[in-house]
């Protein structure tokens, strides 16, 4: 029995869509319990973006998703992080969640749990790899064991199309104005990442 936590932050909904695909993939494995939670939003961000229709609509849609707590991290055997790119790295909301989890680090609560990342950018070369790799750094401090996305099961990555997906993470390209939705191939790779993480988390938990 593996317990998988999908924890994400999404301003405009692209990572939210990817989170649903990752959860679906994780849920394909028998005896797997999947919980999807969102990183709490900053009041300052809500205020600053209150004039953006896409932001307001997406936040409303995400109201059904419970907010992440550090207890959720303790509960899980495996944790998959949905992290949109901000200047080539993770958003402050996600960093704040990790920075306030010092007690978990101190007590080694997350050591030996499986972890994976999925991400998004506005543009193709906007930082999908840098966001993933730099996000991995704090996760390794917590003692997580990283699970990537291999080429063997994800031939869609061997492509010159403007789509996400790399050995480091599942990903999507939102478009410079955010008007693109995740491509079916990107969602498929996200699903496979969820399934793979659940599989590894279950084995590690045994
Ligand atoms: C403050 C800020 C910084 C951003 N920095 C980048 C960036 O470095 N590269 C990029 O391609 N997109 C960048 N973007 C676009 C976001 O990555 C994009 O809106 C996000 O991936 C969409 O995911 P979401 O709808 O789940 O929030 C930035 C957006 C904001 C608001």
Image (spheres, grey):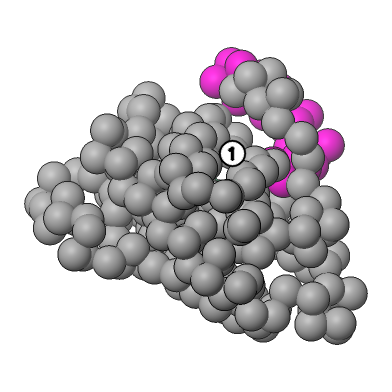
Percent x, y of residue 111: 69, 80
- Residue pointed to by mark 1: 10
Q: Nearer the viewer, residue 159 or 79?
A: 79
- Answer left or right for 109 relative to 147: right
Q: Vertically, is 191 above or below 157?
A: above
- Answer left or right for 169 relative to 65: left
Q: Is 47 inside the magenta-drawn segment?
A: yes
Residue at (73% x, 24% y) in the render = 63
Whether the residue under disc 1 has CB within 8 Å of ligand 1? yes
Residue at (72% x, 24% y) in the render = 64
- Answer left or right for 166 relative to 36: left
Secondary structure at numbered mark 1 = loop
Can you say which quadrant of the picture contains the C terminus?
bottom right
Can you say which quadrant of the picture contains the N terminus?
bottom right
Region of the chain picked out in magenta, as a range: 38-57
Residue at (54% x, 30% y) in the render = 12
Q: How many marks?
A: 1
Q: Nearer the viewer, residue 154 or 130?
A: 154
Percent x, y of residue 7: 64, 49
Residue at (82% x, 51% y) in the render = 69
């Amino acid at each position: 029995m593996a317990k998988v936590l999908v924890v994400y932050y999404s301003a405009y909904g692209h990572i939210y869509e990817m989170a649903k695909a990752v959860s679906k993939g994780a849920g394909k494995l028998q005896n797997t319990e999947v919980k999807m939670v969102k990183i709490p939003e900053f009041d300052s961000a809500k205020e600053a973006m209150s004039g953006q229709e896409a932001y307001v609509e997406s936040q409303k849609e995400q109201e059904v998703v419970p907010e992440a707590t550090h207890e959720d991290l303790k509960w899980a055997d495996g944790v998959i992080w949905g992290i949109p790119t901000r200047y080539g790295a993770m958003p402050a909301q996600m960093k704040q969640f990790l920075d306030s989890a010092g007690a978990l680090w101190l007590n080694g609560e997350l050591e030996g749990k499986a972890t994976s990342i999925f991400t998004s950018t506005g543009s193709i070369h906007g930082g999908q790899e840098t966001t993933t790799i730099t996000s991995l750094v704090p996760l390794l401090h917590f003692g997580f064991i990283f699970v990537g996305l291999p080429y063997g099961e994800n031939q869609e990555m061997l492509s010159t199309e403007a789509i996400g997906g790399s050995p480091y993470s599942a990903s999507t390209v939102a478009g410079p104005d955010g008007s693109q939705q995740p491509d079916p191939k990107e969602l498929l790779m996200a699903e496979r990442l969820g399934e793979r993480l659940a599989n590894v988390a279950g084995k590690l938990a045994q």
